[in-house]
Image (cartoon, rainbow, N blue to C red):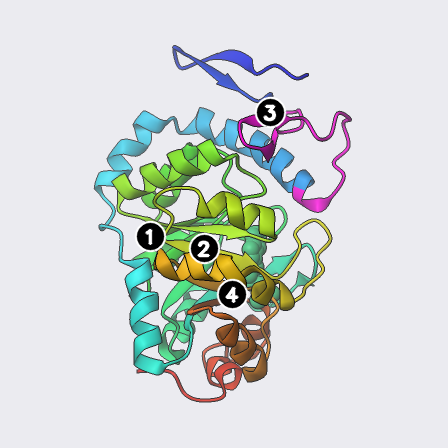
Amino acid sequence: MYQNEVVESQGIRIRRRPPTGPPLHYVGPFEFRLQNEGNTPRNILEEIVWHKDKEVAQMKERKPLYSLKKALDNVPPAKDFIGALRSAHQRTGLPGLIAEVKKASPSRGILREDFNPVEIAQAYEKGGAACLSVLTDDKYFKGSYENLQAIMEAGVKCPLLLKEFIVEAWQIYYGRSKGADAVLLIASVLPDLDIKYMIKICKILGMATLVEVHDEREMDRVLAIEGVELIGINNRNLETFEVDLGITKKLLEGERGELIRQKDILVVGESGLFTPEDIAFVQEAGVKAVLVGESLIKQSDPGKAISTLFGRDVSE
Ligand SMILES: O=P(O)(O)OC[C@@H](O)[C@@H](O)c1c[nH]c2ccccc12
C-alpha cells in the first residue's frame, strides 16, 4: 500500500502524492487504493493525470498560492456560468451551448491548423454560444492559460470554463486569475472529498463547477455530493476514446433522472455531437446544455457552424 509523502513546501509541511508516481484512484466510499502499481500508465487518462501532477508541482514552485492572491484581486468578478446556460435554454428552447476552444486532442490530433483563440471565441459568441470552454492543457490538447487570459481580456461576454485536468486546488485559483468563471472536475480523477472541497473553493471564488461523469457509479457518487449544481455526462470514454451518445440517455433514465430533476441539477451532454439529430437525441434524454468542440472547430467559420449544428440560427 502506498503512503502519502510528507514534504516541506514554502515552510509548510504538506502531504502530497509523489510527482513522479501513480496517483490515487477512487474506488469506493472512504477507500482509496493504487490501481496501478507499475511505472507505466495503462491508458491515456492515467498518462495525462500523472503528467499533470508533475506539471502542477512545477507551476506551484514558480507561483505559490500567496503570490496568486494579488492577481485574483485584479481580475473582474466571475460571471454566472449556470445562469447563462439556463437563459440560453429558455430563450431558444434548445440546449444552451458551451462551445469549446480546442486546437487538438489525443484522440483526433490537430483539429484546426489556423488557430486564433480570440477570433474563434468571438465567432462562437456571435454565433449564439452561451458559454465557452477553453482547453489549457498544453501537452495533449495544445491549449494554454494564455489563450484563456487573451479571451478574457478581449472582452468576450460569455462565461469561460477552465477545461483542465484538475488535480489540485491551486489550479482553480490560477485559472480564476486568468479569467475562468467555471471549472471542470472529472469524477474519475478525483475522490469525493476533493470534489467537495473544490466545490467549496469555487463557491468562495464565485465560480461554478462542472462535475464530469461517464458511468452509473460516477453519477451516483456525484449525486451524493452536496452542492453539485451542474453535471456533465461525457459520451467519450477518456480511457479508450470510444464515443457513445447512449451513455447520456442511460445515465438519465429512471431514478437517477428523477433525483436530478428533484435537485434541479442542470445536465450537460458532452462530446461527439455533430448533427441536429444528435442534439435532439441528448435533449430528449434530458440535457439542458451541450459541450461541443470538434464539430464546430473544424469548420472554416466556427460561429456559423453553430446554426448548422442546431439546425437553425440561435444567435440573439
Ligand atoms: O470535441 P468534442 O467531441 O465535441 O468534445 C468536446 C468536449 O466534450 C471534450 O473536449 C471533453 C469533455 N471532457 C473532457 C475532459 C478532458 C478533455 C476534453 C474533454
Residue with the mark numbered 1: 181
Type of secondary structure dominating the magenta stretch:
loop
Instruction: From the viewer's side, name the closer residue of 128 and 89.
Output: 89
Q: Is mark 1 within 8 Å of ligand 1?
A: no
Q: What percent of the width, then of the height, locates residue 233?
A: 54, 58
Question: In this rendering, would 17 be left or right of 79?
Answer: right
User: Looking at the picture, does residue 165 appear above or below residue 283?
Assistant: above
Using the rendered view, name the quadrant where residue 201 is placed. top left
Tell me where residue 168 appears, x and y as whole percent: 47, 33
| Residue at horizontal 55 percent and vertical 71 percent from the top | 297
Determine contact: label 1, label 3, CB under 8 Å. no
Q: Which quadrant of the figure shows ligand 1?
A: bottom right
First along the sequence among labels 4 and 2: 2
Q: Quadrant of the N terminus?
A: top right
Q: How dense is the environment of label 3, judged by Cα within 10 Å: few (below 14), some, or many (20 and up)? A: some
Front disc: 1 or 4: 4
Alpha carbon separation for disc pair 2 and 3: 29 Å
Pointers 2 and 3 in contact (C-beta within 8 Å): no
The residue carrying mark 2 is 231
Asked whether residue 193 is drawn in magenta, I would say no
22 to 284, vertically: above or below: above
Depth check: give the residue in front, 289 or 222: 222
First-in-chain label (1 vs 3): 3
Name the residue that disc number 3 marks: 19
Give the residues in magenta: 19-45
Amino acid type, mark 4:
Gly
Packing grade of label 4 (10 A; few <14, some 14-19, many >=20) is many
* Residue type of the residue flagged with mark 1: Asp
